[in-house]
Image (cartoon, rainbow, N blue to C red):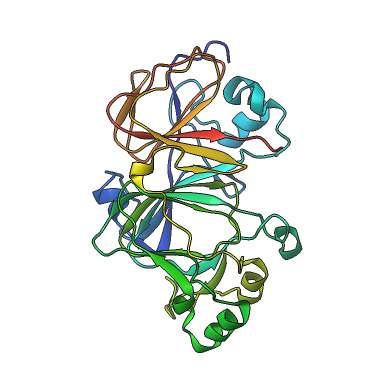
Amino acid sequence: MTDLPPVPIRFLPQYHTRVWGGRRLETMLGRSLPDDQPYGESWELSDRPDCQSVVASGPLAGLTLHQLWQAHRREIFGELLQADPRPRFPLLIKVLDCADDLSIQVHPPAAVAPELGGEPKSEMWHFVAVEPAAMLYAGLRWGVTREQFARTLESGTVAECVHALQPAAGDSLMVPSGRLHALGAGLLVFEIQQNSDTTYRVFDWNRLGLDGRPRQLHVAESLRCIDFADFEPDLHPAAAGNPLAECDHFVVERRTTGPTATAPGLRLIMAIDPLVWGETPVAAGSVALWPACLPPPRPPSGGAWLEITVRSPR
């Protein structure tokens, strides 16, 4: 690993069809999609057993993110993460193209997830493109109780209980586990989250999945997970500056310059605009990783990016 060239590591995206997906990965980000299906997610950095990010080029080409995490932890991810007990890289990073509303859903908190056979997940959204009147849902409206919410499940009026917000491009929102939420139609979103794929759907707008059948709901699990004291959270507007989101698992900042690294260490970015980093092009929506074993890099050039700091367990 000591002979790595001074360039970032880039990964091949993994595309996933979704009933709510569209084609903006192609039309806005210039991606070549596999077919004409609705693609809702591009997994840009993933260490899931069923979806592995693969290094796109260079001397590490063909290696998976899991192989880097298991066999080259110190060289690639640095001393701070060398002793991390988690068996897989702890974050999952995606681009979401929401051509239709996502289901109203919740992710399990750490205290509940093991009992339900799931994984906890907190995440953040950064809104890259927002169509006029596009909305999202997050948290409960003021005063909604668990009992009131349960009644709306029976009547099919769940959306009346959920707080609605209208984001603008550049805004962000932290979605801690336990927060009821749904992205709305007309949003292109960058998502940074814990490495988890556990989602409990409360309501899916009475629609059919791509297979022509209703998608599974998880009402009992959702009622166990929803934070019924989480009322009307606010967006983090673009003008509010950094950090865009912060939790025990990660910190996300938006940058157009610096800070220039002064010491060796992992740097992880997601390009908002097309960038050049270490003379390597990084396409919009793509993730690039600067290995900890390399000398500190100059900042990327060409536009804006999300700078992502991975936090170790406390």
**In the displayed structure, would residue 228 be above or below residue 310?**
below
Picture quadrant of residue 116: bottom right
**In the displayed structure, would residue 312 be above or below residue 131?**
above
Residue closer to the observer: 32 or 295: 295
Q: Residue furthest right?
A: 115
Task: Work out which quarter of the rendered image holds the N terminus and state it.
Answer: top right
Count of marks overlaid on the render: 0
Tell me: 112 left or right of 254.
right
Picture quadrant of residue 279: top left
Task: Work out which quarter of the rendered image holds the C terminus and state it.
Answer: top right
Q: Residue furthest bottom?
A: 155
Horizontal and vertical percent position of residue 307: 45, 33
Tell me: 249 left or right of 286.
right
Horizontal and vertical percent position of residue 217: 56, 75
Horizontal and vertical percent position of residue 246: 53, 42
Horizontal and vertical percent position of residue 27: 24, 50
Residue drawn at x 59%, y 77% is: 145
Residue closer to the observer: 287 or 142: 142
Residue drawn at x 54%, y 47% is: 193
Residue closer to the observer: 225 or 117: 225
**In the displayed structure, would residue 223 be above or below residue 311?**
below
